[in-house]
């Protein structure tokens, strides 16, 4: 069975990530003991984790995790207010980040562990 966005949310709560808000299909989280924000996006029942573009240099580290797949290009959403903005498909800048599809509970655990390690946690 496929790993759902709801299962991803449950896993993040178990990992003690703090949820700040959820608007439509975007939710903001903070890593435990950190002020680093990341977002989840639910689309068709599947979950993605979106991280700041500054972490794009670590994409290979994340995609080396079994069950993690990077989505092509950048993910854009006006709800990701802690992320930088750029011009994309309109005159107004929009927030953007690097998105990864998460396909299993273990992939979610390993992804958060890797992000925490990169931040020096």
Image (cartoon, rainbow, N blue to C red):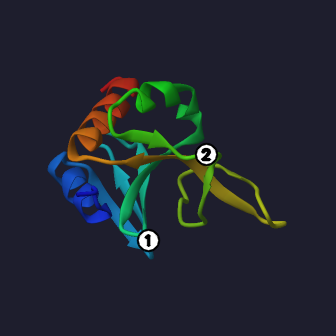
Measuring 54% from the left and 66% from the top, which residue is drawn there?
79
Measuring 79% from the left and 64% from the top, which residue is drawn there?
89
The image shows residue 85 at horizontal and vertical percentages of: 68, 53
Measuring 53% from the left and 53% from the top, which residue is drawn there?
82
Mark 1 or 2, closer to the camera: 2
Specify the farthest residue to the left: 14
Relative horizontal placement of residue 31, taking residue 86 as reference (left or right): left
The image shows residue 49 at horizontal and vertical percentages of: 42, 50
Which residue bears the numbered disc 1? 25
Measuring 29% from the left and 61% from the top, which residue is drawn there?
4
Towards the viewer: 34 or 112: 112
Task: Give whichever of discs 1 and 2 has the lower sequence position.
Answer: 1
Specify the farthest residue to the right: 91
The image shows residue 5 at horizontal and vertical percentages of: 32, 62
The image shows residue 98 at horizontal and vertical percentages of: 55, 44
Q: Is residue 22 above or below residue 40?
A: below
Label 2 SS: loop
Which residue bears the numbered disc 2? 72
Label 1 SS: loop
Q: Is residue 41 above or below residue 65?
A: below
Q: Is residue 101 visible?
A: yes
């Amino acid at each position: 069975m496929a790993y759902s966005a709801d299962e991803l949310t449950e896993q993040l709560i178990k990992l003690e990530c703090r949820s700040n808000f959820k608007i439509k299909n975007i939710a903001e989280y903070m890593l435990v003991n950190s002020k680093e924000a990341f977002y989840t996006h639910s689309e068709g029942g599947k979950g993605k984790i979106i991280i700041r573009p500054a972490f794009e240099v670590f994409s290979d580290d994340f995609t080396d995790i079994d069950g993690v797949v990077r989505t092509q290009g950048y993910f854009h959403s006006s709800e990701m207010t802690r992320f930088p903005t750029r011009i994309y498909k309109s005159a107004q800048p929009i927030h953007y980040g690097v998105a990864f599809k998460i396909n299993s509970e273990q992939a979610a655990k390993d992804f958060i562990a890797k992000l925490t390690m990169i931040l020096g946690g």
